[in-house]
Amino acid sequence: MAGHVTIEEKYSNPSLNLAIDTIRIRKQALVFANTKMSAERTAEDIAQKTGINSAELNELADKVLKVLSKPTRQCERLARCIRKGTAFHHAGLTQKQKELVEDSFRAGKIRIIACTPSLAMGVDLPAFRSIIRDLRRYTRHGLRYIPVLEYLQMAGRAGRPSFDSFGEAIIIAASEADKEKLYRNYVLGEPEEIYSKLAVEPVLRTYLLSLIATGFVRSKKQILDFFSQTFWAHQRASMDELEIIIDKMLGLLEEFEFIKSSMDEFTSADKLDDLSYRATTLGRRVAELYLDPLTAHNFLVSIRRATKIHILPVSFLHMVSYTPELRPLLRVKMKEYDHIQEELAKYGEHLVVNEPSAFEPEYDEFLNSVKTALFFSDWIDEKDEEQMLEKFSIRPGEIRAKIEIADWLLYSAAELARLQHFRKIVSEIAKLRLRLRYGVREELLPLLKLRSIGRVRARALYRNGIKDIGDVKKAPVATIAALIKSRKIAQDIKEQLGQKVEKTSRRKRKGQKGLV
DNA sequence: GGACGGTGAAACTTCAGGTTGCCTC
DNA sequence: GAAGTTTCACCGTCC
């Protein structure tokens, strides 16, 4: 590090001073914030003081606004920052917006990015300065100091190998006493030991089933041999503990009928408890789907129940919402508590998951899953991103992330239903997946079969009486072109339906699926 | 006297992220 | 713990 550096203290906010100074010396900085909201706020505060203006940035801001069919408040806020040469970056941005921000930072157009740890984790985006505003983060147990490893992740972004001979990682301390402590614990601190994640039961049972399903292990002896060589076992003192856990898992998998045990040629005669294991058809599929066996089992129970009651789309949306895979769920805010409970009362008879009693600890998480299901439900009712932000406090990027996981879970559930020969459920879920991915009501499904037609264009056609493929065939190209605001795509659609159209296009234009 | 509107302080809430899974309907 | 949001007491104004 380059010894003592003095920064002009123009404002009372240290990270603001540092950011402005970074721009002054014509460098770039990442400012790491604690929460999405504070990342946005930080970017906004800096934006007010940069004094930067450029056509290039305005153009970029316009692009950021056009990412969704209708910009959300978040999009507008980001665009305002970008016009001034700053940006915020967190999981709430759409993929496209993240790319735009990252690329223009690399190109030097955006000077400062205020971000959550999202940027420290995956993206390779070095800057001259890494400004770390707070080394504490809110957890379930209150405000806690983050691990040294995470600090290193953030600090490691400082210095661009091909541009700077060094970089500056700066922690902002609240007081002199704090400064000492932070320096000792973080700058001089030793990174924590890495612990094997295998020991977590969901991971272990998934892995175990997969090993058996692929035939990689057959007997309990082989299973123990295998796990004894893992990092997990390496960190454990006793194999006894390991064996107890594995026995428990094997029992569970057998109870779920994902595996069967038997005595065969692999069973050594002297050890009667050294049984041979193989996966059932169902178990093999669960392993292929990479599903947590417990989730798979819960799905199967729910699917059986679904054959007996009147199901709605929300039934399956809720089923996938109540899984560990979809966590963290949308949280029920205090003010929403009553409302969510009312909704639960309304839909309760259509749910395929057992409702815990209000006194059980998992009840809150259950209500969260109901809220999450309601969010999906609104999405397939064509509510737009701004409405989702308003009603559920969920940002565009988070919507996409949740939908992707839900889609995979629904696919998996449909596969399990198929193996159980519940054909009606398979087709119900297939329809639901399509609706979820496009965010549309059922009536638009026929139109979505066409390439380049997503929620927005399909709705535009439908609103004007073009409701299915037959209507599309009958309608003149010009009508379609006017409705979807693209001549090129209108022609392409006609061609998809085998109808000849004379080419009138002079310019090339890229068609896009109307999703985020 | 009462309804209304504006203001500011106090009380109350909320708070990061992401890996692969599957198949292309 | 800090920042954003809501609530509420208080005050002045108007009818």
Image (cartoon, coloured by chain):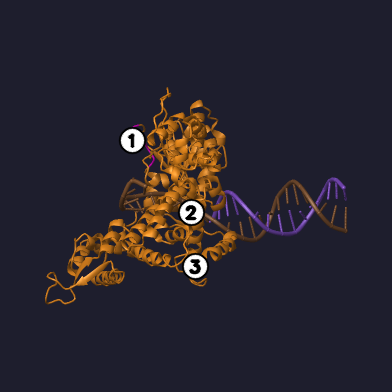
Chain colours: A orange, B brown, C purple
Residue at image mark 1: A161
State how far apart marks 1 and 2 are (Cα).
44 Å
Residue at image mark 2: A376
Q: Residues within 10 Å of mark 2 (few under 14, many from 20)?
A: many
Task: Please name the residue shown 47% across and 57% down the image.
Answer: A313
The quarter of the picture where the N terminus of chain A appears is: top left
Question: In x, y percent, where is residue A273?
Answer: 19, 76
Numbered label attached to residue A363: 3
Query: Given the image, on which type of amino acid does mark 2 rest?
Result: Phe
- On the image, which quarter does residue C1 sit in? bottom right
Numbered label attached to residue A240: none
* Element at label 2: helix
State how far apart marks 2 and 3 are (Cα).
20 Å
Q: Which stretch did the figure color magenta?
A: A157-162
Query: Given the image, on which type of amino acid does mark 3 rest?
Result: Tyr
Question: In x, y percent, where is residue A436?
Answer: 45, 50
State how far apart marks 1 and 3 are (Cα).
51 Å
Q: Looking at the image, which residue sits at the far top?
A: A506
Q: Are marks 1 and 2 on the same chain?
A: yes
